[in-house]
Image: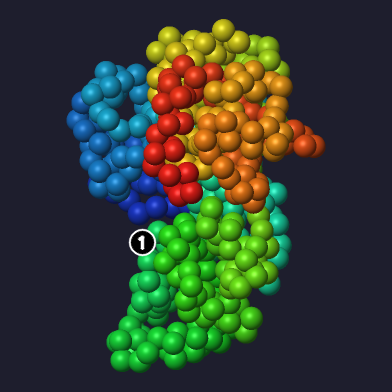
Amino acid sequence: MQKEWPRLLRLFHDELGYTVREGNPTLGYELFYVDLSSWKLRLSNRTPVIWVKTKDLDGVTSQHLMQSLGDVVRERNLQRQITLVLLDGNSTPLFKYKTSLSFNLALVGGEEQKRVVHSRRPSGELLDIISAQIPISYLSPYETRAPVTGSRFFGREYELSRILANPDTNHVILGIRRIGKTSLLRELERILKEREDPSRVVYLECSDLLSTDDYIREVVRKLNPRELPRLHMQKYVFFFPNFLERMSQINKAKTIFLLDEVDNLVIMQRGDWELFRMLRASSNKGACQYIIAGFREAMREQYMLDSPFYNFAQEVRLNEFSRQQARQLIVTPMENLRVHIRNEDEVIGRIYEETAGHPNLIQYYCMILLRHLDQTGEREITPKSLFDVYADEGFTSHLLTSFMQNTENREKALVYAILMTAEEAGTKGFTLEEIDAVLRKGGITMQQNAIDEACNVLTLAGVIHRKGKIYYFTSPVFTKVLHQTYDLNYLFRKVKEEGYDRG
């Protein structure tokens, strides 16, 4: 039998179609979870709700009540989530003690609940109450350091649907660091585990699995750990293919492997390929589907005729966002946070051009703007606001770090040589012949295929783009920051000393 619910949650569930789940009571309080992921903010499909009934307020001071709510948050490990507190009484006295807590509690008192229930825009009314209490820079979905899923997943819907629509095909997701490969894999994992038997969906972070033994042991541990002793008794070359087929037969469906950061594993396997040949065989037999994410090494192996990667998977390249995707990432959260953008087209255009459409940089950009609004109390972004970003050392450092981490010395040499030779290169463009000429002038000779590959990597990284035979620097801010931060002659000389045939 369904227990009693707060009137606000009943409205959201019965009339507005939100998913509300009952939780286990904690310290005498009723606990619920509501799916607010459609708001595209840092509110998940399991946003916790604590119900403080009238009887819970009898004889309890506001200070003691806030201490009690803090204990609920600790008990349920909700410290890193935004938690709603539906209070059947006056919430105002509690605010005096709320500031001393580090927890992200949004208090919704009896009058506020009544206002939401009787509003013609109840969702918006509740969001207004939450955003007035939680800093908007925290409430926003922007994340620059960790993968995101669900309500905070933006802009890769086409790639997501393409992979999900082809369950009989392997896929290799290629992209630079921080472009969203892990977020895409994690979102695929979330959706697949909702649609399929979760036991047959296996996500593996492969950067630390550097041998065949490491990989096979981790797969067996995830799929059927009871067979680990058998693995130790039998050579894996006989055990593992049979194991994968048996798992498929038991589940009466393919095992879906999501393999993240495979580049180091590729390097360690190159020349032998024993593990990857087993993976390819398991796919050919219909026992497994593989969705792989990598960058440079995975991309290189795609085109090697003697590699087990050749013709193994459909390529899915994650490039920079389109202008429309960037607009969605910028505007949707801002609107939900009640932040107005004046001269919207100009603001979005400048953010897009200065970040080159790189989703990680767009989010970093937006985070700086929201932090500034939190400090000033304002709720409007104008073209003038963008100067706050230019002055932020964190943004320029983030911009340059992304370039340094995503390029090897060969690509760095190419960029430095062009910028040293022609400061206006970002606007006038350059051909392969001109690239070769400036490299030779600097004392570096590269074969044509090496220059082509370097340009392909820089294009994938969003540093340059191509129109016909001409290459252009994508972001004028990048070239400006590089000039202002470093002596390019020094950087070019260090690349030559370190060796430009390796990273």
Q: Which type of secondary structure does the marked residue at label 1 adopt?
A: loop
| Residue 88 image-quadrant placement | top left
Pick the residue in front: 104 or 160: 160
| Residue 47 image-quadrant placement | top left
Q: How is the image coloured?
A: rainbow
Q: Horizontally, is 243 left or right of 349 in the view?
A: left
Classify 396 as above or below 198. above
- Residue 143 location (% of width, % of height): 46, 36
Question: What residue sits 43% from the left and 37% below the top?
Answer: 495
- Residue 205 location (% of width, % of height): 42, 60
Pick the residue in front: 136 or 158: 158
Badge 1: residue crowd in 10 Å (few <14, some 14–19, many ≥20): few
Question: What residue sits 50% from the left and 86% below the top?
Answer: 241
Question: What residue sits 21% from the left and 33% below the top?
Answer: 67
Q: Horizontally, is 367 left or right of 74 in the view?
A: right
- Residue 102 location (% of width, % of height): 27, 30
| Residue 384 image-quadrant placement | top right
Classify 262 as above or below 39. below
Q: Horizontally, is 388 left or right of 38 in the view?
A: left
Total label count?
1
Whether residue 422 is visible, yes or no, is: yes
Q: Horizontally, is 231 left or right of 462 in the view?
A: left
- Residue 287 location (% of width, % of height): 58, 81
Pick the residue in front: 130 or 37: 37
Pick the residue in front: 334 or 482: 482
Question: What residue sits 71% from the left and 18% below the top?
Answer: 345
Residue carrying label 1: 208
Q: Amino acid at mark 1?
A: Asp
Whether residue 145 is visible, yes or no, is: no
